[in-house]
Image (cartoon, coloured by chain):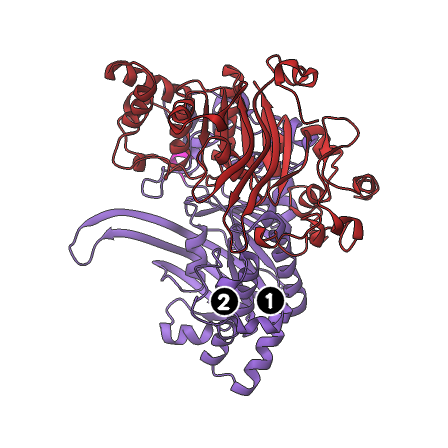
Chain colours: A red, B purple
Amino acid sequence: MQRSSPPSSDPSAAKAGPRGPVLELRDLVTRFPGDDGPLSIVDGVSLSVASGETLAVVGESGSGKTMTFLSAIGLIPPPGRVTSGQVLLEGTDLLTHTPEQLRAVRGERISMVFQDPLTGLNPVFTIGEQIVEVLRAHRKLSRAEARKKAIELLERVQIPDPGRRVDDYPHQLSGGMRQRVLIAMAISLDPSVLIADEPTTALDVTVQAQVLELLAELREESGMAMVLITHDLGLVARHADRVAVMYAGRVVEQGSAKAVFEQTAHPYTLSLFRGVPSLDTDTAQDLIEIEGQPPDPAFLPPGCAFEPRCFLGQGRASCQATRPGLQPTLGTEHQTACLHSAELTATRARA
Amino acid sequence: MNADLRSTGEHETLLQADDLSKVFGGRGLLFRRSRPEVRAVDKVSFSVRRGETLGIVGETGSGKSTLGRLLIRLLDPSAGRIVFDGRDITGLAQGRMRKLRHEMQMVFQDPYGSLDPRMKVGAIVAEPMLVHGAERSGIARRTAEILEWVGLSPAMAERYPHEFSGGQRQRIGIARAMALDPKLLILDEPVSALDVSIQAQILNLLRDLQRQSGVTYIFIAHDLAVVRHISERVAVMYLGKIVETAPRERLYAAPRHPYSASLLSAVPLPNLRAERQRKRIALYGEIGSATALPGGCRFHPRCFKARLVAAAGGVATTALSKDVVVPSRCTDSEPPLADDGNGHFAACHFPLDPNGAEARDSAPFAAGQSRRHS
């Protein structure tokens, strides 16, 4: 259930963790100007994540998953603009912050790791200099103290021989090592929330596993909340406590990992599960396709955005009439934005 | 010393590579500067049967893409031999090679970069037919047919590539490659740039085209699940070498090379219960560099099996560092790609047992692995 009252007084929040949600987005809307009026790239997204918890946000390109969190931390690229909603970080609304206040919050209390480890690092400075810069921008530390802390951080992200590596330039490191450096920078100020946006998509599978295990360890040690933005359902299965599935700028299903995987309540989620080859799928069968392609935000249908591609709702008047909002399914913690989710039980049984 | 993977008997070989190598760098011709030598592909031998799909998997730096480009002669091999359809094409001049390209085509990962943005889709698909001297009158009809075949409407021939989505662009790339009814299609990461919901469409299309035309595929990718879905046989590459090759079921159920086993265990399954019960085999460090190949077996610095064999005793050992000891055979001699008698080849001195139990039960668990990378 989306929390509608402040986290401190909400009983359902208490269940999520001892301190309730650390980060909570409420009805977030981000618009970009389009040819025929503004387009809602993020369209009323409500999500929350508690300390020590991993929330996986799943979606394809254009689903709004990255834009949602860029909006939340005030990094939405112009001409995009957050037009309504709240972003509560430990109870305070970041959307009321000035740019200076936001800068102070980023890194300090909430930080983000991106997909491409090369663009996040400046090629002309050593990795040590870059970590020192982050530390000294937020903390009163001497250069020597900051360098010592930088070496400790490199050690924490399991970079071998950190005392020597600290003087390396980014190009001297492998992709996996560069991503570790970015993670070191992201956790250098002990943030309460770490947002990892496709952190391992550019990495090989063996390195990917190592980097994600590192993130899981850091989360356990520090108790920070983690948001894992990904398209890889295998990673979601391995790492997520809760899952939110996004499509066309909205959350279409969310709940515990167990509920979303085992009692899937949205046809889009189910189609993703069935259409992705895995190491245990039956190779004699063709994959079950999702027809068509993700919608263009400028041409969203008036009804459910997934209706034109949906095996359940395609052509159904009820689906074409209005865009359904998130509704609880069996438990209040598991929600779906599908009018006909009850029919999925039968589909699942056949699958 | 290289195992010979020539097919025997009933199936006919379409393409065969013998000891194929590609070395980049070395002494520069112009300024005589010496750059480090990169052995991107190092004495690789295999064959592909008519009508089958051979999957080639490997991580960055494994040489799999270089291998694909060598096979179709977009790169010239440094050594070795390529036989295509009974004919040695290794030394074929580029002009004669171009004529042969209607029989072997390539589809690339990036459907944006590989289509000329100034050409209409119809012209893109028709171009290979024009180049190979097809009759103009037939081309328009054939273009429409092919577009329809790959799931695009013939009316789309009048549009430009930028008007299409990534998945549609990949269909155009496939249409162009199939225009001359090739015998072999080399597909280099054809779905890795696509959204997950589009990948299934393209994989199904490829299978469908093969069922209808009998075209042979070499499918190169890093995604083990995708390769498993489309390939009958799979070859695993590591630092320029094929380290294992086997029929799909055997490779995935009972990998015999420790690298293949580690790689497979690292792939997360999109299934909550199965995934959380699974263990990931420890893999030490990161893929090495082809400029400084380890001696002996090139996988030995990262291999869990070598450590286990050395620890069990009874073999001569070599210490790599204070706490890493491996059998001396692994550091001293390069294991040949050897057949186990059932078409399952592995290049390992101490291959995993053939029933898969060893990879499942005795391999070390990654979560408990040392925090230091050895």
Asked where in the image residue B316 lies, by quadrant, the reply is: top left
Residue at figure coordinates x 51%, y 29% from the top left: A212
Q: In this view, does B267 lie above or below B186?
A: above
Q: Does the magenta stretch include residue B260?
A: no
- Position of A61 with respect to B249 (left or right) is left
- Boundaries of the magenta span: B329-333
Say whether residue B49 is visible.
no
Q: Is residue B227 above or below residue A53?
A: below
Give me the disc on residue B105: 2
The x, y position of residue A291, in whole percent, is 68, 55
The x, y position of residue B288, in whole percent, is 38, 37
Q: Residues within 10 Å of mark 2 (few under 14, many from 20)?
A: many
Given residues A4 and A343, the one toward you in this image is: A4
Check disc 1 and report its element: helix, strand or loop: loop
Give me the disc on residue B56: none
The x, y position of residue A196, in whole percent, is 49, 31
The x, y position of residue A152, in whole percent, is 35, 17
Q: Give the residue type at disc 1.
A: Val
- Position of A56 with respect to B272 (left or right) is left
Most frequent secondary structure within the magenta stretch: helix
Q: Is residue A37 above or below residue A108?
A: below
Residue at figure coordinates x 64%, y 44% from the top left: B250
Check disc 2 and report its element: helix, strand or loop: strand
Q: Mark 1 points at which residue?
A: B215
